[in-house]
Image: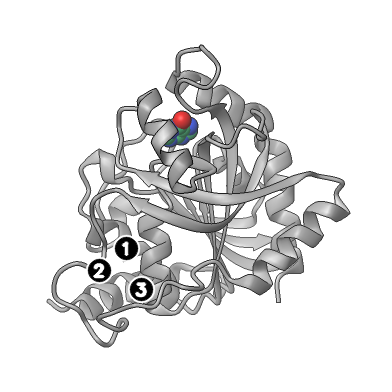
């Protein structure tokens, strides 16, 4: 089966089940899945029912598409995503993004919980991702290329759409929210980084670190889907505060700041072209 056949099989299964053709796709990170509860006339479609989809196992991730109306726009959310550290292949992580493109989505909003690497940041900050460093040691485009999906050698100079970034700045300012900006470094996980790694990543130019988003952004760039990505800084990265890191704390902060982050994303969806 070609990659395009795999994409088409999933998209053909989903399309008749959606309330309307989606315009905007959203991937909701840890603790941010609550945005899906704000969707009006929601239709929930678990990944396990979608042909060719893997199963999601990460805590705090529900593992379903939720389609409907958000802020007056037709959206489809991924409530839960596939992470490389769960053992999924990179192709499995790319698949939903390609399916969202096949469904006609014109933009992809990626959200995540991340560790702050930049000392100017604080826990609870929102960061607009302006670029990334792929430190996962793998790439979803490795292997045979399906030219119907995208080009063999994919330009990565504008993965994070400049117009959507400008819109995010405007929308945050209109709410009086400080929006940090920076480079997200994708780390394979599932262990957190060591303090030495965090110092190295800061030297490399990272402002935040996390275990998702990069494979999805690469897949989106490949199939020509404009991306807007934002991180919620749930903790300062290893070695920066003298405190130890815990997944529970990441989820607690994500839950605490989640509602404001969700409002920001909802405003953005409303303002999107
Ligand atoms: N490192 C990696 N991933 C994360 C972190 C972190 O500090 N916080 C939330 N996700």
Circle nearer the viewer, 2 or 3: 2
Residue 150 in the image: above or below residue 23: below
Circle nearer the viewer, 2 or 1: 2
Classify mark 1: helix, strand or loop.
helix
Query: In the displayed structure, does residue 156 sit left or right of residue 89?
Result: right
The foreground one among 144 and 195 is 195
Q: Which residue is mark 1?
A: 94
Q: Residue furthest bottom?
A: 148
Q: Which residue is mark 3?
A: 11
- Residue located 30% across and 55% down the image: 49
- Residue located 29% across and 51% down the image: 48
Q: Earlier in the sequence, mark 3 or mark 1?
A: 3
Classify mark 3: helix, strand or loop.
helix
For the residues labelled 2 and 3, the Cα–Cα distance comes to: 20 Å
Circle nearer the viewer, 3 or 1: 1
Task: Name the quadrant of the N terminus.
Answer: bottom left
Ligand 1 image position (quadrant)? top left
For the residues labelled 2 and 1, the Cα–Cα distance comes to: 8 Å
**Is the Cβ of the residue at disc 3 closer than 8 Å to that at disc 1?**
no
**Mark 1 Cβ inside 8 Å of ligand 1:** no
Q: Which mark is residue 152?
A: none
Q: Earlier in the sequence, mark 2 or mark 1?
A: 1
Neighbour class for label 3 at 10 Å: few (<14), some, many (≥20)?
many
Q: Which mark is residue 141?
A: 2
- Residue located 36% across and 71% down the image: 98
């Amino acid at each position: 089966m070609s990659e395009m056949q795999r994409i088409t099989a999933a998209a053909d299964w989903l399309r008749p089940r959606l309330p309307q053709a989606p315009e905007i796709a959203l991937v909701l990170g840890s603790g941010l899945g609550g945005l899906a509860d704000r969707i009006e006339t929601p239709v929930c479609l678990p990944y396990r029912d979608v042909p060719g989809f893997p199963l999601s196992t990460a805590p705090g991730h529900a593992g379903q598409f939720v389609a409907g109306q958000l802020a007056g726009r037709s959206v489809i959310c991924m409530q839960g995503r596939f992470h490389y550290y769960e053992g999924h292949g990179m192709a499995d992580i790319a698949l939903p993004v390609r399916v969202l493109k096949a469904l006609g989505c014109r933009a992809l909003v990626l959200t995540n919980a991340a560790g702050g690497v930049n000392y100017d940041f604080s826990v609870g900050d929102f960061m607009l991702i302006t670029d990334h460093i792929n430190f996962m040691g793998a790439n979803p485009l490795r292997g045979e290329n399906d030219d119907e999906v995208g080009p063999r050698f994919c330009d990565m100079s504008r993965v994070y759409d400049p117009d959507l970034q400008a819109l995010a700045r405007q929308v945050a300012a209109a709410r009086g929210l400080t929006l940090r900006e920076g480079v997200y470094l994708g780390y394979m996980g599932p262990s957190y980084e060591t303090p030495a790694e965090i110092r190295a990543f800061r030297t490399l130019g990272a402002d935040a670190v996390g275990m998702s988003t990069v494979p999805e952004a690469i897949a989106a760039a490949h199939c020509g889907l404009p991306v807007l990505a934002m991180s919620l800084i749930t903790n300062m990265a290893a070695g920066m505060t003298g405190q130890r890191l815990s997944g529970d704390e990441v989820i607690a902060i994500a839950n605490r700041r989640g509602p404001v982050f969700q409002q920001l994303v909802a405003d953005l969806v409303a303002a999107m072209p």
